[in-house]
Image: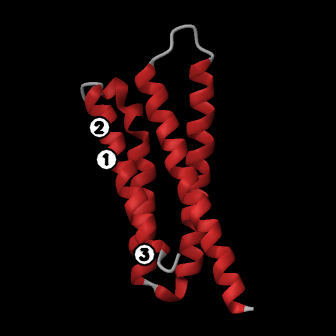
Amino acid sequence: MKNMSCVTLVIGMLLLIQGLIFWGMAGFEGARATAAIPSGFGILLIACALMAKAMPNARKHIMHLAVLVALLGVMGGAMMFFKGLGAEERDMKKLLDQGLMAVLCLVFMVMAVNSFIQARRGEA
C-alpha cells in the first residue's frame, strides 16, 4: 500500500461509526457506553492518520503507533468476544460489536505490516 494513512483514516472512521451505532442500539445510555469503545480506537486511528499526513517526517513512527493501537483493539476485542462466547447468557449485539472491532483492527494490522514489508524491500 502506497498510502497507509488513507487506509488508517478509513478504518478509523469505520470504527468510530461502529461504536456510535452499537451505542445507539443500546439507547445511548451512560451505563452502556462500553458499546462505544470501538469509537475510541477509531478516534485514535483517525488522529494517527491526520498526524501522519501533517508530519511526513514522522510518518513511519506515527504509523507504528497506529499499528500498536490496532493490536490493542485486536487483543481487547478478541478477548471480550471469546469471554462473551463462554457466558451463560450470550448477548449477540455485544459479540458482534467486539468481534467486528477485532476483525477491523486485524485487517488494518495485516495491511500495515504488509506495507511495512513492502517499504523495507523498496529501501534495500
Q: Does residue 58 appear to the left or right of 41 in the view shown?
A: right
Q: Does residue 7 appear to the left or right of 120 in the view shown?
A: left
Which marked residue is nearer to the observer: mark 1 or mark 3?
1
Mark 1 → mark 3, Cα distance in angstroms? 20 Å
Q: Secondary structure at mark 3?
A: helix
Q: Does residue 4 appear to the left or right of 23 in the view shown?
A: right
Q: Label 2, on which residue?
A: 21
Q: Secondary structure at mark 1?
A: helix
Most foreground residue, 47 or 4: 4
- The residue positioned 41% from the left and 80% from the top of the image is 53
Work out which residue is located at the far right of the displayed protein and give it.
124
Most foreground residue, 67 or 118: 118
Are circles 1 and 3 on residues that touch, CB within 8 Å? Answer: no
- The residue positioned 64% from the left and 75% from the top of the image is 116
Return the x and y of residue 57 as percentages of the image width and height: 52, 89
Q: Classify mark 1: residues with Cα within 10 Å, few (<14), some (14-19) or many (20+).
A: some
Q: Label 1, on which residue?
A: 17
Return the x and y of residue 84 as percentages of the image width and height: 56, 21
Most foreground residue, 77 or 65: 77
